[in-house]
Image (cartoon, rainbow, N blue to C red):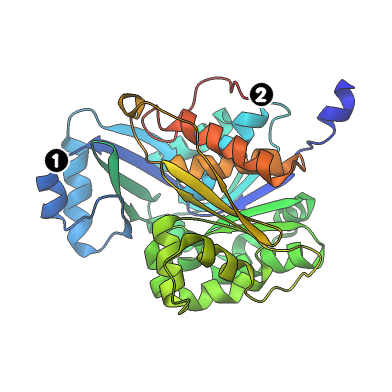
Amino acid sequence: MKTVFLSRYSENTLFGMGNPLLDISAVVDKDFLDKFGLKLNDQILAEEKHKVLFEEIVKRNKVEYHAGGSTQNSVKIAQWMIQKPHKVATFFGCIGTDHFGEILKKKAEEAHVDAHYYEQNEEPTGTCAACITGDNRSLVANLAAANCYKKEKHLDLDSNWELVKKAKVYYIAGFFLTVSPESILKVAKHASDNNKIFCMNLSAPFISQFFKEPLMKVMPYVDILFGNETEAATFAKELGFETDDIAEIAKKTQNLPKENNKRQRVVVFTQGKDDTVATVGEKVTMFPVLNIDQNNIVDTNGAGDAFVGGFLYALVQEQDLEECIRAGHYAANVIIRRVGCTFPEKPDFH
């Protein structure tokens, strides 16, 4: 029996592409947030006025550095849940030729992810300041090198495209729409044409607000769409759904035009400690999350990425939706007990 089970996994079955960032996490106070005009639980791209923030946060006591970037976190967690074989997960993104870039390479290797970075020396490796206050976090991403990903310099190279073709499941966070929508479309079309599974994430309210056009160009190719309740509400508003009922938003999103009719779109919206909402065939179903004592929550940063990572782990094994969500809830429950998107040596998921 054992060999049959292992054959579900082969190297490079899961493909992710996105912004590889080094997370710089520190506990801050409300004054710090106010000073830089940050909102609780928001994600934004750094502007000129935030340059000082990065200098200041590093001087705080107890700063932690973790390999981050939304998509990279998710594929890393999927690989952690899989354990063996190594390198089931592939990751593409752009880094700088610098110390932070070396850390990201080392961390990807330790996580047994097959990372193929496009390395350039114009811009330094991207960073993300995770400003933590209690169980809230506010993220400010300085993409830098991550913003320099070039389709023709990396994705289009034969050796890299071969890795894309090997995959059966694809995941790209919406954040990458700000960098290389043409790369996303190339991968999404490949998945659709070959009846493979392409997954995407709404990622942050600003994506639906300011990158709606590239988002909607990719949408017809999206088989599974993830998001949280805030992102879902913003998306609904931008598309004129005229409802703030999350189940209805999920249904309307499911019914948006789709290229590959062999697969009905699945929409999955998480809501923190409230039930996860998912479209199951023609119905919308609620899935309760695992209970956790408030005192055990250390850091909710990475909970959404972890949920997707757990979900992808089950999806790669062709498990049903309910099982994928159960695995996602498990992974998120593990991650929020720790600082950053980090995990214990082995999962204990049954």
Identify which residue is drawn at 50% across, 79% down: 213
Tell me if mark 1 has few (under 14), some (14-19) or many (20+) residues whose alpha carbon lies within 10 angstroms of its own: few
Q: Judge left or right: residue 43 versus residue 251.
A: left
Q: Judge left or right: residue 239 versus residue 287.
A: left
Vertically, is 100 above or below 290? below
Distance from disc 1 to disc 2, alpha carbons, whole Å, reads: 39 Å
**Amino acid under disc 1:** Asp
Residue 59 location (% of width, % of height): 17, 36
Viewer-nearest of labels 1 and 2?
2
CB atoms of marks 1 and 2 within 8 Å: no
Q: Judge left or right: residue 213 versus residue 36.
A: right
Tell me if mark 2 has few (under 14), some (14-19) or many (20+) residues whose alpha carbon lies within 10 angstroms of its own: few
Residue 192 location (% of width, % of height): 75, 66
Look at the numbered disc 1 and give the secondary structure of its residue: loop
Judging by the rendered image, the residue that carries numbered circle 1 is 29
Answer with the quarter of the image where residue 267 lies. Answer: bottom right
Residue 328 location (% of width, % of height): 57, 39
The quarter of the picture where the N terminus appears is top right
Residue 331 location (% of width, % of height): 53, 33
**Amino acid under disc 2:** His
Vertically, is 335 above or below 279? above
Identify which residue is drawn at 89% across, 29% down: 4
Judging by the rendered image, the residue that carries numbered circle 2 is 350
Identify which residue is drawn at 55% across, 65% down: 150
